[in-house]
Amino acid sequence: MRIVGRGRVDRTITVPFTFDGRRFWGHEGDTLASALMANGVRMVGRSFKYHRPRGIFSAGSEEPSALVTIGHGTARTPNVRAPMQELYEGLSARSQNAWPSLSRDLLALNDLLAPFLGAGFYYKTFMWPRAFWERVYEPAIRRAAGPGALSGQADAARYDKAFAHCDVLVIGGGPSGLMAALVAGRAGSDVILAEEDRKFGGRLLAETEEVDGQPGPDWAAGVVAELTALPNVRLMPRTTVTGAYDQGTYAALERVGLHLAAPHPDAPLETFWRIVARRTVLAAGALERAIAFPDNDRPGIMQAGAVRAYLHRWGVAAGRNVTVFTNNDSGHRTARDLRAAGVDVAGVVDARPDAPDSADYPVFAAGHVVGTSGRHGLREIRVRHAGGQRQLATDCLAVSGGWNPSVHLACHMNARPVWHEGIAGFVAPDGAVPGMAAAGAARGLFSTAGCLADGAEAARAALADLGVTVTSVEVPRAEDGAYDIAPLWHVPGKGRAWLDYQNDVTVKDVEMAAHQNFASAEHMKRYTTQGMAPDQGKTSNVAALAVLAEATGRTIPQTGTTTYRPPYTPVSIAAMGAGGRGKGFAPERFTPSHAACVRRDAPMVEAGLWYRPSYFPLNGETSWRDSCDREVRMVRERVGICDVSTLGKIDVQGPDATAFLDLVYANTISTLRVGRVRYGIMLREDGHVMDDGTCARLGPHHYLVTTTTAAAGPVMRHMEFVHQCLAPRLDVRFIPVTEQWAQFAIAGPRSRDLLNALLDTSIDGQDFPFMACGAVGLMGVAGRLFRISFSGEHGYELAVPARFGAALFRQLLCLAEPFGGGPYGMEALNVLRIEKGFLTHAELDGRTTAFDLGLGRMVSPGKDCIGKAAARRPGLCGASREQLVGLKPVAPEGRLTPGAHLFAEGAQAVRVNDQGHVTSACHSPTLGHEIALAFLKDGRARHGRRMRSVDHLLGVETLCEVCDPVFFDPEGARARG
Amino acid sequence: MRITCPLCGARDRREFHYMGDAVYLDRPDPVAPAVAWDDYLHLRDNPAGETRDLWFHEAGCGAWLVVTRNTVSHDVLSVALADGIRGGAG
Ligand SMILES: [Zn+2]
């Protein structure tokens, strides 16, 4: 019901919206909650467990009851707190947790079963039989209990992440926060003022107070105008600071487009911020708490402060005939304000025996509300007071159990709040978050004048910390009343009295937890689920602790609180994961030949972040095997081209480069001549092989080291570690040049012929023997040529600056054609290397040693190297180790699969009999059968023996013969020729 | 968490790669007994309080850093270049 002349919504603008399909109208400036209330909608949802009718309880993000689903299809968002949803034209909201409809919810039957659904009910009832846990109980519970549901479709909206830095972060834009921002802003510091609401002002927007002789909202607007004009101040409305982290880092969620009928397509709906602040003023205010009394959860029973907020900010009366239940002065303020606005007040029930009297409404001193009635909304309350019993007809009961300072963020780094007897509440502990200080209501100061002064002082102190002196601060005049409270947490008596509305936890549940010895706050929480709903018990936790304290004969500070953890309010996963959807999850790295490969219809496969061609299908080929076999034969018989730019390349230079490489490589580099390449392995310090690759000596003090594709980063990091941490006096420098060079393998018997058609100066076996390297020129471009082979064929790798890579690939393919050559992909590359027993990360899996790989003699005895000492450990060599071997099937059609395990003939294929495993396998078109590389216990001594290869996953079992891992051309004549 | 790199200034921890205890700086002699190598490679304290560990400013300047911090309070007490600490060795 709107009150004429009240509130700050723009009544000239009408905003249509729907709730459960019914059309309603609100005004510009309304929230969904204020608009529903103005339209007389009282019941907006059903409770989580008992399906009790629920209404709007608060006017802020602490809302436990009025959760709705907004939107349709992919844009559907469940569990939106109605007071947080700004109204826009066409907004569509639906109630949750009710079926078939809100007023005729069949699952309200749960409420009749309440005696059986108390605390610990899940743990006790659904224990047996175990097989029912997932198939029966969980689906049933999820259907019956629980808030709104997701759409099940991918969210098509945009979200964003952002970062900000400032001198002073002010959290909360009420009187304390505005003053803090003003003082810091005027001093010239970089200030961020984050406010959860769309408007700055905090409680000033919800009360009638004056500041410096102006209405509170006008004073706030003036401050905002001044702050807006300051270039060093960033105002962030609709932004909730959700977490405090180490070294002044804060998380915040900005609602950028959730209030718009048509959000800009390029703008995010929400932005997840990381704000780094040198100092922080926590001006998060305080939240009003409830009092538990029988049947205190009916629609129409709400926070007394929220009743004032709806009246003063939105011009809405929460009822026609309001009652108040309070244990402190602020309940009377609600009664006075309603009377002044012409709303009937049937009485104020004040728990204090010395309750202040009033001429405008009846006051029931030493009064308790002991019962309520009204099926879908409050109709009547029963009152017991100093003078006896009364029944009062009322459609709205405004409750104030006192105010809890919002200490959450101050406690995010494991601190506990401190009990403050004067306000019967917890306040933020000092210094719990380095650089943060609480101010105003967050610190337990509840008068406006106190908050204004405290906010200014907090900013002054923060600035002083940063070396900025603020001499005089003028604090505006405002109300400076005292705050009187006599704690009352729950009214004793029969009937269920709710603490946690969102999770349906009652006083009896907490008492039962205490009686069953779940007496610590953390145990009680988990046993009852108190405070574990999305609202995290913002309006109920302290009362629940008080009930627990009473039930266990302790004081509240003795009982203590549970742990405060981020986020303060729910943060959508979409915002936290912004940018990480689809391809955004990981950057894509493309080789110089990428476009050409895609044009040739090569399926591209991921190799780390890289994309590489799997194979190059030709007309008539029906499977990847056809293409792969052809490409292998092409390389063995003619010439093939493969983009190997993804291999890591590290340029190493300096007078001590040789000594350095001797330290990081297991084998000796110092004997390598200029113009030659050597295969090398690097060990980890624990003796296992880290990576392999080639090392080319380009000059006396200049090397080019290559790594496997995946290890490019880790090897660079390792080399920096060895240099900076172990050998800083070595005069050597290195940089990664992986992306600076495009590099192509040219492999096959015709590779030199092809090169000589390309190079400015032709080469021969004399000036370019196997494992030679050197500078070459091609069409005026300076390149590098390495005669190395990962295929076992006469082959080269040719490198040019990356910008020439695409052109060179095209040219190489053109030149290959007359020789019957062409491109080959990863599948063929893999077959070629398995045929030769060459290694990849399937074999270098971090658990294998040089000994295991048959490379033990590469670990030079004449020098120290990383990993040498540990590699000598007894367990890392010897017959007990699984050693690299080759496998071939005894029957020519036998299948070998990577991941299969090896067992002796006749032994059962179980773990205790495991003799090793297959790491790589393929069909060898060269040999005409499948081959595999494997690790086998004492494998090198078992060549010629038969083993069973058993792949339990694929159900493949093959009898095979152990052999040397080099299947093809074991002398290496083809590569040398 | 933020680490102040002596070369780059205060940066988000996502720019850094964590390695482990700064004991890795004290590599034993190659011929040291196996027990010394075992200690170096595998045995670590797990202090509730001050600890020194190695971080690599991988997305920054590429410096290896020795970060002294408190595992309880999360305070970062000092950050130094590893090669400055090992300057006299190698
Ligand atoms: Zn740095």
Image (cartoon, coloured by chain):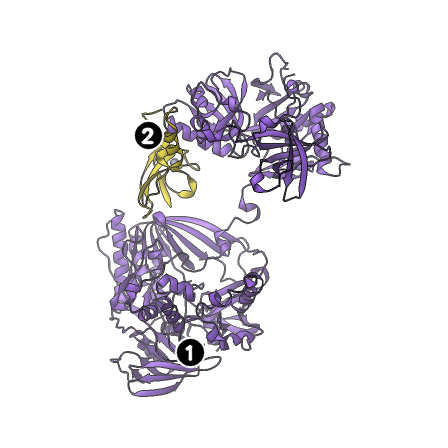
Chain colours: A purple, B yellow
Residue A467 screen position, x and y as percent: 25, 46
Mark 2 lies within 8 Å of ligand 1 (Cβ measured)? no
Q: Residue under circle 2?
A: B84
Residue A323 screen position, x and y as percent: 37, 81
| Residue located farthest toward the left when viewing the structure as drawn | A471
Q: Secondary structure at mark 2?
A: helix
Which image quadrant is residue B52 in? top left
Give the answer, above or below, for where A589 lies relative to A273. Answer: above
Which chain letter matches label 2? Answer: B
Question: A942 or A493: which is nearer to us?
Answer: A942
In the rendered structure, which amino acid carries the disc numbered 1?
Asp
Residue A794 screen position, x and y as percent: 65, 20
Q: Residue under circle 1?
A: A295
Quadrant where the C terminus of chain A sits is top right
Mark 1 lies within 8 Å of ligand 1 (Cβ measured)? no
| Residue located farthest toward the front when viewing the structure as drawn | A906
Which image quadrant is residue A352 in? bottom left
